[in-house]
Image: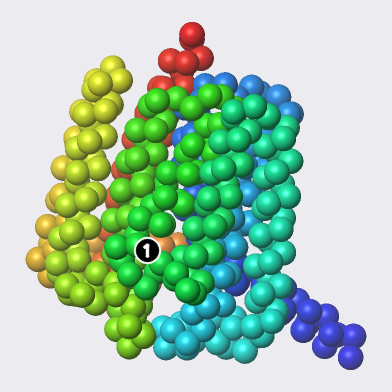
Amino acid sequence: MSSNFRSGFIDKIKAHLELLDPVTWISVFPCLAGGVMASGAMQPSIHDYLLLSALFIIYGPLGTGFSQSVNDYYDLELDMVNEPSRPIPSGRLSKKEAIWNWSLVLCAAVLLGTWISIHIGGQRGMVFAGTLLTGLFVGYIYSAPPLKLKKNIFLSAPAVGLSYGFITYLSANALFSDIRTEVIGLACLNFFMAVALIIMNDFKSKEGDAKGGMKSLAVMIGSKNTFLVAFVIIDLVFASFAILAWSWGFHILMYVILASLAVNVFVQIPIYSDPKNSVSFMQHAVDDGFGNAIGKSDVQEHNAFLRFQLVNNFLFFINQLVAAGLIGIKYLSL
């Protein structure tokens, strides 16, 4: 009995952790790191390292985990079609247990965020508290009725961009310094990049969305046109990034960003031409080099998106972190 109890307890903990969807936590980390770097104010002290760790915990396991848990709770019927192996539709967690899951991580995020806001104080503390609470609120109404922002792509994609790309940059910057004007520019770029990526990520649930009345762009205009819209947004983000880098005096970085844009366009063309089969031109390189790290989908368009995302995110995040570092160095010397 003791062995069965231990095994059941461990399985339950694993299911709760899966409900928080750990693979999604890392999506906010580059923006958090960029915001901290661009502040140019973090010191190599135990105090600042503890603040940094708390920041990553709040926006990773707690904040992002909260939004993922709420999403699974309110999307049970859709997940029974799209992802029946998830903890709630598979029966590994009850709906009541799911409520406890996202309620506890929400309370932990609010309590830890409140302590940090009071600790840093002043206008920075207000910015930190405001951005965190906004992110948590948007994370809830994204999935929860009656608003359920995810039902319409014109609301869902901006909500994700705001939470994952914009708020995280400002919050991380406010943790160590006043908001830098350049950080607002980087935050805006991340907002639009997140919008483009969430548009394509909806390929995985296209069938369930259509049956459930969800108005994703893939459902409304088809896969090929969805790729076109997303690619145009992404290319404009890179082009705007290059212009900003030039205006900030980072001329070499501007040329690197333009080269990254050229690589992206090279990858985009075959995907747009043949959304279902184009991924084969980079399939072996991905499988051999990364295995299951980026996932694999039975939906061919989503599979193509996952492979494109590997290239795009690497290029974008590397350039963004370099820019954030250069911004931080500039303020460090003042």
Between residue 316 and residue 134, name the one nearer to us: 134
Whether residue 309 can be seen here: no
Between residue 251 and residue 218, name the one nearer to us: 218
Whether residue 255 can be seen here: yes
Q: Quadrant of residue 123?
A: top right
x and y percentages locating residue 229 in the rendered image: 18, 59
**Residue on which disc 1 sits:** 156
- Residue lying farthest to the top in this orientation: 334
On screen, 222 above or below 318?
below
On screen, 258 above or below 20?
above
Q: Residue at x 42, y 50 (%)?
A: 162
Q: Residue at x 73, y 50 (%)?
A: 111
- Residue lying farthest to the left in this orientation: 273
Q: Residue at x 60, y 63 (%)?
A: 66
x and y percentages locating residue 194 in the rendered image: 35, 53
Between residue 283 and residue 220, name the one nearer to us: 220
Between residue 25 and residue 189, name the one nearer to us: 189
- Residue lying farthest to the right in this orientation: 2
On screen, 206 above or below 268?
below
Q: Residue at x 22, y 36 (%)?
A: 240
x and y percentages locating residue 262 in the rendered image: 16, 42
Q: Quadrant of residue 97?
A: bottom right
Q: How is the image coloured?
A: rainbow
Q: Bin the neighbour count of mark 1 within 10 Å (Cα to Cα): few under 14, some 14-19, many 20 and up.
A: many
